[in-house]
Image (spheres, rainbow, N blue to C red):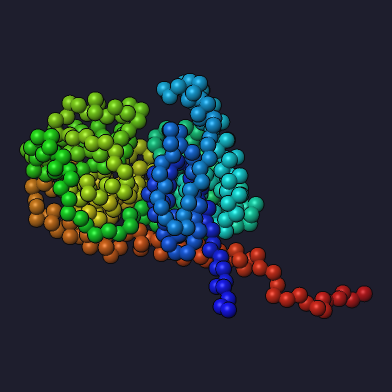
Amino acid sequence: MASEAPHVHKPKVCMVAYCESPTWLPAMFNEGASLAGAGFEVEFLCLASSGASSPPDAQVPNLHTRRFAVHARRLFHNRFGMAAPGRRLAAVQRLLSYAEYVVKAFGHALAARADLYVAHDLPPLLPTVLAAKIRRKPVVYHAHELWSETHARVPFARFWRLIDRALVPLCDEVVTPEENRSRIYREEFGARRQPLTVRNCPPYRSPIASTRLRDELERRGIAFATVVLYQGLIDSMRCIEEMAEATRYFDEGIVLVIIGGGWGKWADAPSRLAGYERIVLLPRVAYEDLPPYTASADIGILFYRNDCRNNYYCAPNKLFEYMMMGLPVIAANYPGMQALVEGEAVGLCVNPEDPNEIAGAVNRMAADPEARRTIRANGLRLSMERYNWENEFRPLVERYRALLVDTTRRAAPPLWDDPHPARTES
């Protein structure tokens, strides 16, 4: 009678987030899916949806999502409505919501009984570190943002900096998407070693032929020769006003298509952009459905306002999404962006707060199809050879495995007990 195959333990990774779906943070979802494919069991801990139903989960073997509700924010919304509350009321709401989140995330993280814990961004770091230390397991901080500096006036910025300085030294590994941010976490927040830089590259996929945007423009009766694309958050932080104003100086036949959504004063983006004849606004598209839209444009554009270090050292995934679909890129002339965009000859960098400079770069690119073909070839080659998630994932999974081995060695009992313990001389 054949014996049953021995059960192979799959190391479990618990990833804690402060969002409603892993797909809302593509870098986290890519990491989880790749770990699951590499023989790990992965559990995401996310917030329960604030809407009528939870976002659908991707069906990936060995990967699942557990959600939990934070009732404080629902209580405030039900009591005071969804409109922006006063400053004091907003502060109370944030504090109570975060306190409830920490308690619940900590409890679920303990219950996960993981072999390794990962906090994705700063809000989950406190409950993740507490759970990992109690269970004597390694903890990784994946700092997608400089959280206390995500814009010029972050609520409770001092509190978030205090959390960073207190907890970063307790982490076994810190991961950031950009080298300058890695330096900041080492020098200012006390990371034990130089953080691992893992870029926000998407999984590699071959470029596709698509006419999705062009078909939409033709359907609307809009005349065009060159399609410039911005995809992402519609917000002043992304220099939307400057982009819009630049369209007034576009050469004939150039159209800017904006795909995305916003909130606050940009919740009704169509009305705010109604006076710009060269702008076509499309609603937000699910991340996994974006490539046909991206591939059907001629130029990709992305900017961040230089009002905080998080923007100055930006590391946007859309840069690599543009490159992977063969789009020349026009980006901000900030250190990290300039080194990649102009250093790798995949586009041009400009002052993102100067509409004339933006328009000048767009017009030059649109008027030079030969340069666009060369840049397209560079972007496609670099995406296949270097700037893809598969390459970025290798050092990350190697580090995770090393952390698990180190933890196992520290926890392992002696191979045998000494039958003749040393006796002290009287």
| Image x and y of residue 271, in percent | 24, 25
The structure residue drawn at horizontal position 40% and vertical position 50%, both measured from the top left corner, is: 58
The mark total stands at 0
The structure residue drawn at horizontal position 51% and vertical position 43%, both measured from the top left corner, is: 67
Nearer to the camera, 408 or 307: 408
Q: Residue furthest right?
A: 426
| Image x and y of residue 174, in percent | 49, 54
| Image x and y of residue 398, in percent | 46, 65
The structure residue drawn at horizontal position 22% and vertical position 54%, both measured from the top left corner, is: 325
User: Can residue 179 be seen from the camera position used here?
Assistant: no
Please identify the quarter of the rendering in which residue 33 is found: bottom left
Quadrant, the N terminus:
bottom right
Nearer to the camera, 411 or 301: 411
User: Can residue 412 be seen from the camera position used here?
Assistant: yes
Q: Is residue 381 left or right of residue 56?
A: left
Please say if 248 is above or below 320. Answer: above
Q: Residue furthest front?
A: 1
The structure residue drawn at horizontal position 69% and vertical position 69%, both measured from the top left corner, is: 413
Quadrant, the C terminus:
bottom right
Nearer to the camera, 16 or 409: 16
| Image x and y of residue 270, in percent | 24, 28
Please say if 277 is above or below 376. Answer: above
